């Protein structure tokens, strides 16, 4: 009996080998470094067209081969990290700021405030990001910034709803009431008691959304309202290479791998952050 | 009872109502309770008798409740007090011990952080607050207080957590401590320890205590005066000896009769409160 109990406790403690999480964090670190220094690391100019070198398979000279226009895929993938990651990052920052602020105000404000904010989120949720991006592309000219604005505007309402529902629950928690009974002010109550207990779910949501946002931005690039043609944005690279699956799979595979590795790493990191954030999941120290 | 001037807390003609879909529902009617300085008063009644609502009215924790009557603390009228002044009283002059130590602690903050909070929000330096917090936690019987200060609530047992909750309530050195069923979530042995701690603290600091409980078994050893509530009204108020010796109200007799006694006749069944309450 006792041995069973002890073993159960052990498996619960080490739910996953920390090695996997560590690798994911190292990969994210590398990605960030590539995003910052990528263009400098690239062995070739990622934009230089040389049709005599078109569709060369991976070799010592071109590790990832060349695309249909003779551009070095490795250089483009490295340069693309900055574009894709920063666009995704900007979308998520805008989304988080808008979502958390408006969601919290809706949850804690009076009924009128709540109603107004929630109807605005309804509008945001009803608009498909593609239509919105097309509109911005017409107004601002097609480009990555139109895609970023469009995705941000359609993404935040989901966050606002999530934050609102969690905050509404947490503000009635007994420890929040205990805070009131101690004379804790409104602002401190929100900052120290309500939000820290509401937002842990957001960390996971954000890291899972890195992959989703990345795909939407790449999708918008694919239909021509996101990153424009010579740009080595990963989604745009895949779109441009889609016609060469049979005679140049490498020009498709490597940016695809880049997206996949980034997405998986952020998902693993999300788990890790959740455990770090929640003291009840942390190992007793 | 004591003269009015000596009462730290003086509740007079208090009614509490809530606006509901069925209209205004009044749950506490015309209640008078006084807590003399340095004394311990127990507020006793069954679930739903309005004892908690009455106690919470003192701190005005329910935003949507309607209060009528008068609650005077140190002769200051609390009802209708500006929110800012009310907030200043909470935690520093009137402390509140919650019922359930499992849910009344913030799970993502360390125990020490929460004990320090009432001092920190009133401008005491972190170092000083920490020193006093560790000192108090140690005096409340938490072993290794210094080490455990930076632990999280989930690393504490129920009884230890209730000590933390008490520490949070009394670190601001309030004159009045309201304890809302502080021992309900604890086992009997820990119950006794916690009550003993409260008596010790109250005597050491000359602090008045209002204990809310449904358990007459713990009242005799704790309180000097007892107020019995039923259906939102006070049915009897007396000092503890007189009340136990000669309960005046049939409901009080019912409550006392419902407590199992070690020297009772094993053949006789326990009385139910309902055996008495209809006579009222």
Image: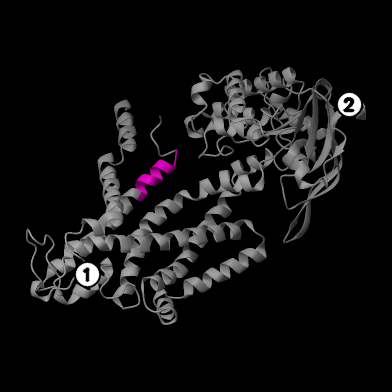
Residue A191 lies in magenta, yes or no? Answer: no
Image quadrant where residue B159 sits = top right
- x 51%, y 19%: residue: B144
Element at badge 2?
Answer: helix
Frontmost of labels 2 and 1 is: 1
Chain under callout 2: B
**Of the pair B1 and B118, the residue shown nearer to us:** B118
In the rendered structure, are the residues bearing label 2 and label 1 in contact, judged by CB atoms less than 8 Å apart?
no
Number of marks: 2
Which residue does the numbered mark 1 point to in the structure image? A47
Left or right of A78? Residue B242 is right
Chain under callout 1: A
Residue A108 in percent (x, y) is at 62, 56
Instruction: Measure the alpha-carbon separation of dots 2 and 1.
Output: 88 Å
Q: Is residue B13 visible?
A: yes
Image quadrant where residue B28 sits = top right
Residue B211 in percent (x, y) is at 73, 30
Quarter of the picture holding the N terminus of chain B: top right
Residue A216 in percent (x, y) is at 34, 69
Which contiguous range is marked in magenta? A270-279
Give me the disc on residue B6: 2
């Amino acid at each position: 009996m006792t041995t069973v109990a002890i073993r159960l406790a052990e498996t619960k403690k080490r739910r996953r080998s920390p090695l996997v999480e560590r690798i994911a964090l190292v990969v994210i670190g590398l990605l960030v470094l590539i995003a910052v220094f990528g263009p400098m690391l690239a062995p070739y100019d990622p934009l230089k067209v040389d049709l005599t070198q078109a569709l060369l398979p991976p070799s010592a000279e071109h590790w990832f081969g060349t695309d249909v226009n003779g551009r070095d895929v490795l250089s483009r993938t490295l340069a693309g990290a900055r574009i894709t990651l920063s666009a995704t990052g900007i979308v998520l920052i805008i989304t988080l700021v808008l979502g958390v602020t408006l969601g919290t105000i809706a949850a804690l404000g009076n009924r009128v405030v709540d109603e107004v904010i929630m109807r605005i989120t309804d509008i945001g949720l009803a608009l498909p990001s593609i239509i919105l991006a097309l509109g911005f592309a017409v107004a601002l000219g097609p480009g990555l910034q139109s895609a970023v604005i469009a995705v941000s505007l359609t993404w935040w309402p989901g966050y606002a709803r999530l934050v609102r529902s969690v905050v509404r629950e947490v503000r009635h928690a007994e420890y929040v009431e205990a805070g009131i009974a101690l004379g804790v002010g409104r602002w401190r109550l929100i900052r120290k008691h309500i939000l820290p207990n509401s937002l842990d779910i957001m960390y996971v949501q954000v890291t899972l959304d890195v992959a989703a946002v990345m795909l939407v931005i790449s999708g918008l690039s694919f239909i021509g309202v996101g990153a424009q043609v010579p740009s080595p944005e990963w989604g745009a690279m895949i779109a441009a290479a889609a016609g060469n699956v049979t005679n140049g799979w490498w020009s498709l595979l490597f940016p695809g791998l880049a997206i996949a590795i980034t997405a998986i790493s952020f998902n693993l990191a999300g788990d890790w952050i959740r455990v770090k954030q929640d003291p009840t999941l942390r190992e007793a120290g | 009872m004591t003269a009015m001037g000596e009462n730290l807390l003086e509740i007079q003609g208090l009614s509490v109502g809530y606006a509901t879909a069925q209209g205004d529902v009044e749950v506490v009617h015309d209640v008078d309770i006084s807590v003399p300085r340095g004394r311990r008063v127990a507020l006793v009644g069954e679930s739903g008798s309005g004892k908690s609502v009455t106690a919470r009215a003192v701190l005005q924790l329910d935003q949507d409740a309607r209060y009528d009557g008068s609650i005077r603390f140190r002769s200051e009228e609390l009802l209708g007090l500006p929110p800012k002044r009310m907030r200043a009283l909470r935690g520093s002059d009137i402390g509140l011990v919650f019922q359930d130590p499992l849910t009344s602690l913030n799970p993502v903050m360390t125990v020490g952080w929460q004990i320090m909070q009432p001092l920190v929000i009133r401008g005491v330096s972190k170092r000083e607050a920490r020193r006093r917090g560790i000192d108090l936690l140690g005096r409340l019987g938490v072993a290794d207080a210094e080490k455990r200060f930076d632990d999280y609530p989930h690393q504490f047992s129920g009884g230890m957590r209730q000590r933390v909750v008490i520490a949070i309530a009394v670190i601001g050195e309030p004159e009045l401590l309201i304890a809302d069923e502080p021992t309900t979530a604890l086992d009997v042995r820990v119950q006794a320890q916690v009550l003993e701690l409260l008596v010790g603290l109250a005597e050491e600091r000359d602090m008045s205590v209002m204990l809310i409980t449904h358990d007459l078994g713990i009242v005799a050893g704790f309180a000097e005066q007892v107020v019995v509530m039923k259906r939102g009204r006070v049915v009897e108020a007396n000092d503890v000896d007189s009340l136990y010796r000669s309960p005046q109200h049939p409901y009080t007799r019912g409550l006392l009769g419902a407590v199992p006694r070690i020297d009772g006749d094993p053949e006789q069944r326990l009385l139910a409160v309902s055996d008495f309450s209809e006579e009222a």
